Amino acid sequence: MSESLSALLYLVAAVCFIMALRGLSSPDTARAGNLYGIIGMAIAILTTLASPYVVSYWLIAVGLVIGGAVGAYIARQIQMTALPQLVAAFHSLVGLAAVCVATAAFAAPEAYGIGMRGAIHPSSLIEMAIGLTIGAITFSGSVVAFAKLQGVVSGRPLVFPGQHLINLALGILLIALIVLFVMTEASSVFALLVLLSLAFGFLLIVPIGGADMPVVISMLNSYSGWAASGIGFTLSNSLLIITGALVGSSGAILSYIMCKGMNRSIINVILGGFGTEGGAAPAAAGAGDRLVKSGSAEDAAFILKNASSVIIVPGYGMAVAQAQHALREMADMLKKDGVKVSYAIHPVAGRMPGHMNVLLAEANVPYDEVFELDEINRDFASTDVAFVIGANDVTNPAAKTDPTSPIYGMPILDVERAKTVLFVKRSMASGYAGVENELFYRDNTMMLFGDAKKMCEEIVKALD
Amino acid sequence: MADPASLAQRAGELAGDAGALAHNLDTLSQQLALATQQGVHAGTPFVFELTVFVLAVFVGYYVVWRVTPALHSPLMSVTNAVSSVIIVGALIAAGPVGLSFSKLMGFVAVTLAAVNIFGGFIVTQRMLQMFQRKK
């Protein structure tokens, strides 16, 4: 296949990828979008296989079959609650693949037409070093994120004195090494660059707590894109450059949206340590002497039945308790009784962007009943019941009223404006941010203590 | 004066000079060609690639802002699948005949990227299948 023909086909693949992202603007077009993505990838792979550089196929076939089988198996088996760690694991693979490709290009540059061993073009060396570094950071960072999300290690942020200084020093050292590598083109510097980048990625994610995981995953998503772009520059392949840029900017935008959802700056998130201070101590101080109204499933069923409109506010706790199916059943019964039911999703509900929407969709909640914060926040004032299940911080009015609160300024769902607020919670414990929610003590709030799934099932029984 | 022998010698020398000159010219033109080639390789394509990159960032920016927040999870998994297009570089590394270190690296990268491609697209498909309208 001639160079220009394959370049043309790569362009077609790039357009397919853009169409894949474009399709996601609405659920109606999203499935077609995914198909575009698959077609684009098939074109890219077949074009490369037909290029004169690729003459031996057996090892490639083995890799494709093994990788494809593993990937397909995992993707079919995975629970939707475990989606964040799956995505983190996948990011790490992209990072590692980038490292492997950069290593291959370094070992056999003539295959890519970027010079000879020991005499690689300087510009290619710079691009190679950058692609390699970002790839290695993506890999080790994603592995840490995966371990935290999977619960292999504690989600608590790991902070130690001098952390930021060490990271800064490491960052400077990395840049120095890249310069040294470009000048010497030595294998030892290459290896050192890989090792230090891996350490840097590890140290970068370790101090970031579980609550900030949506940002971390988006950030790593972005990195994996930049790594692909870096490799694209090295190999002078515009398809890789374009795709990497698309993915990189997509991840960056998601990080931005997540940060805004928590009113945190990206720098603040990266520096880490959020969710360590405060904790249980201040919560215990006020809890003892203030009155909390708690109710049973029957009380809740009575209130819900007599409401004309209900807004359900699900949080990650609902997903942990696997309560989404029971919740949908409850909503179905209410709808049958003529109650208007809708769902309100906070931008950072769940452990990754849009996670809650997927979990609700999995429980067959129609997507036109699910609303984003901006769309539904005004409706709380005219709603009879706000049913908060497994969410806490995202409803805390302290974010609007208390400038000393760690979550001050975070956009929240105005559940307190509803006539009655029902809070399904296991205990009075504070949320991720370690802040107490004064909503629990309001007159129009009723606490429903118990497991989210059990509570929903009991309410369903009581509604019958 | 000019005996044929020395004339022939002069002619021979001149011919040699001309040959050397021609040889010089040849290497010079070769060097020039190489230099232009390298110049093209080091300068212009980089600017061209940077142009492509920057434009693609803008395309990504505007396309992604139009993605509905409800589909941010599928967006993430599909971008993840798509970024495995890095397999293109891996295939070239794994393509030559005979075994070598770079071929092995290429094989590993092909396998990793394949996990991602199949896994990413299938899990996206699974998610999108769940999003249904009110019946």
Image (tube, coloured by chain):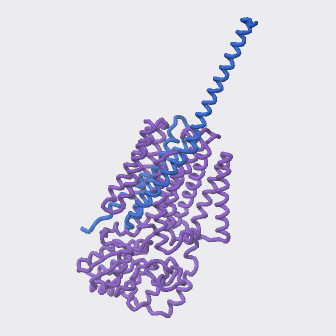
Q: Quadrant of residue A299?
A: bottom left
Chain B, hue in figure: blue
User: B132 left or right of A97?
Assistant: left
Quadrant in which the N terminus of chain A is drawn: top left
Task: Give percent across and percent down for residue A415.
Answer: 39, 82
Residue ranking furthest to the front: B1
Q: In the picture shown, does residue A429 fall above or below B114? A: below
Q: Quadrant of residue A205?
A: bottom right
Q: Is residue A342 visible?
A: yes
User: A380 left or right of A257?
Assistant: left
Residue ranking furthest to the right: B1
Q: Is residue A79 visible?
A: no
Task: Give percent across and percent down for residue A360.
Answer: 35, 69
Task: Give percent across and percent down for residue A391.
Answer: 43, 77
Q: Quadrant of residue A454?
A: bottom left
Quadrant in which the C terminus of chain A is drawn: bottom left
Instruction: Name the residue at 58% across, 41% down.
Output: B39
Instruction: Name the residue at 31% across, 81% down.
Output: A310
Chain A, hue in figure: purple
